[in-house]
Image (cartoon, rainbow, N blue to C red):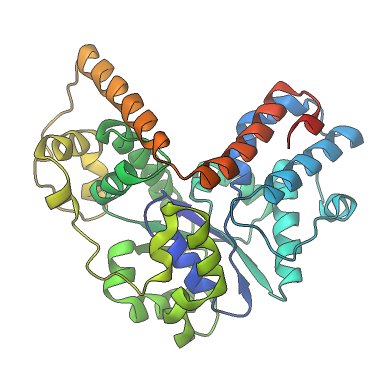
């Protein structure tokens, strides 16, 4: 069985994957974001029916994993084995094959990919993995925005964060209308942290696995320690559940920022049951071209400012993956990537 977590980052996905990792039959690694990073670059491969071209794609996927900031320890990616496992020459086939190898290496029957941006590639995934289960994890977008402003990745202005958040939630909500309850499960960050045992038991029932109390001690696992040591993004995963980590936007965001977010994504907040604080459903977003230009400039400034504070080792790990992706885009010899 394959499990795909969908939604938006900064919503508790690492918390969820570490909890799932406590179940012996499930392997949920830190993701190299295969589909998110390589789908936009598929034009570099031209004809995948050509054996050498497909072999190049397989190698690129494997290298992306081998450069992952949190290593897939003990996993050997034999390129020919990966190729043999694919029943079609596609990126999703390679994606599925490498996760199968990971699960087998760890003695698990099921793998979970927590690359939340997979929500944008569901048609391709569903074609190859029609029995996959989808786990939709969502969080109040205003708290997501507060988290992104502090993070070393992602957008930094509430206007841009709201756009990205709303796009992903809308895609997930459309999925929820199409898939039945045996294939699609929704869970909020607020319920996961506020009523963890109840939420996890419901999740385990959906996944048809037995709930284990060890899921609550996720923070003591070696995977949690490895993850936390890889980036400041994931410091909290070595701590017990933070059940007071909600509604932070009320004290950590300006009223103006919250208003901007609600004007952009208020309909999605409404759909997910989050109460607005600065707008009403009848309010319409009317940002001028000048205002949006100001938002863009501030977003870029904050990104650059945050990058300057990034830990050098963390930055180096991310830049190695970025260099590989640039090499693929340029289709220059990959031996130049170290």
- Is residue 141 positioned above or below 46 on the image? below
Q: Residue at x 53, y 55 (%)?
A: 230
Regarding residue 282, the answer to whether it shows in the image is yes
Q: Nearer the viewer, residue 319 or 325?
A: 319
Residue 279 seen from this side = no
Q: Residue at x 25, y 63 (%)?
A: 245
Q: Quadrant of residue 239?
A: bottom left
Left or right: 280 as drawn, with respect to 151 = left
Image quadrant holding the C terminus, namely: top right
Q: Position of residue 71 (x, y in %)?
A: 65, 57
Who is closer to the viewer here, 311 or 221?
311
85 lies left or right of 28 = right
Q: Quadrant of the N terminus?
A: bottom right
x, y percentage for residue 156? 32, 35
Residue reaching furthest to the front: 312
Total label count? Answer: 0
Vertical placement of 193 versus 42: above or below? below
Classify 321 as above or below 103.
above
Horizontal side of 180 relative to 33 (left or right) equals left
Q: Is residue 101 left or right of residue 11?
A: right
State the residue at coordinates (41%, 46%).
174
Residue 192 figure quarter: bottom left
In the displayed structure, 337 sits above or below 143; it is above
Picture coordinates of residue 189 (x, y %)? 33, 62
- Residue 122 lies, in percent from the top left, at 56, 46
Near-viewer residue (190 or 308): 308
């Amino acid at each position: 069985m394959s499990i795909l977590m969908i939604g938006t980052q900064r919503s508790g996905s690492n918390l969820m994957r570490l909890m799932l990792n406590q179940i012996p039959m499930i392997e949920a690694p830190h993701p190299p974001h295969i589909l998110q990073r390589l789908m936009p670059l598929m034009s570099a491969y031209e004809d995948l029916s050509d054996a050498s071209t497909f072999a190049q794609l397989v190698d690129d996927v494997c290298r992306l994993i081998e450069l992952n900031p949190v290593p897939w320890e003990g996993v050997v990616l034999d390129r020919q084995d990966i190729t043999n496992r694919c029943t079609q020459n596609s990126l999703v086939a390679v994606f599925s094959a490498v996760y199968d190898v990971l699960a087998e290496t760890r003695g698990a029957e099921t793998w979970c990919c927590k690359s939340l941006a997979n929500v944008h590639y569901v048609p391709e995934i569903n074609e190859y993995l029609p029995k996959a289960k989808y786990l939709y994890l969502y969080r109040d977008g205003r708290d997501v925005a507060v988290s992104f402003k502090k993070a070393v990745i992602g957008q930094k202005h509430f206007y841009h964060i709201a756009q990205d958040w709303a796009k992903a939630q809308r895609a997930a909500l459309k999925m929820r209308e199409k898939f039945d309850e045996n294939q699609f499960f929704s869970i909020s960050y607020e319920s996961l942290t506020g009523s963890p045992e109840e939420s996890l038991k419901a999740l385990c029932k959906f996944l048809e696995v037995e709930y284990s109390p060890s899921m609550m001690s996720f923070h003591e696992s070696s995977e949690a320690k490895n993850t936390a040591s890889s980036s400041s993004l994931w410091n909290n995963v070595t701590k017990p559940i933070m059940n007071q980590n909600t509604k932070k936007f009320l004290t950590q965001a300006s009223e103006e920022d919250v208003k901007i977010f609600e004007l952009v994504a208020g309909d999605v907040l409404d759909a997910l049951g989050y109460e607005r604080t600065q707008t009403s459903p009848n309010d319409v977003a009317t940002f001028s071209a000048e205002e949006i230009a100001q938002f863009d400039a501030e977003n870029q400034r904050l990104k650059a400012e945050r990058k300057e504070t990034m830990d050098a080792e963390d930055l180096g790990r991310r830049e190695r993956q970025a260099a590989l992706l640039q090499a693929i885009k340029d289709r220059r010899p990959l031996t130049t990537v170290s």
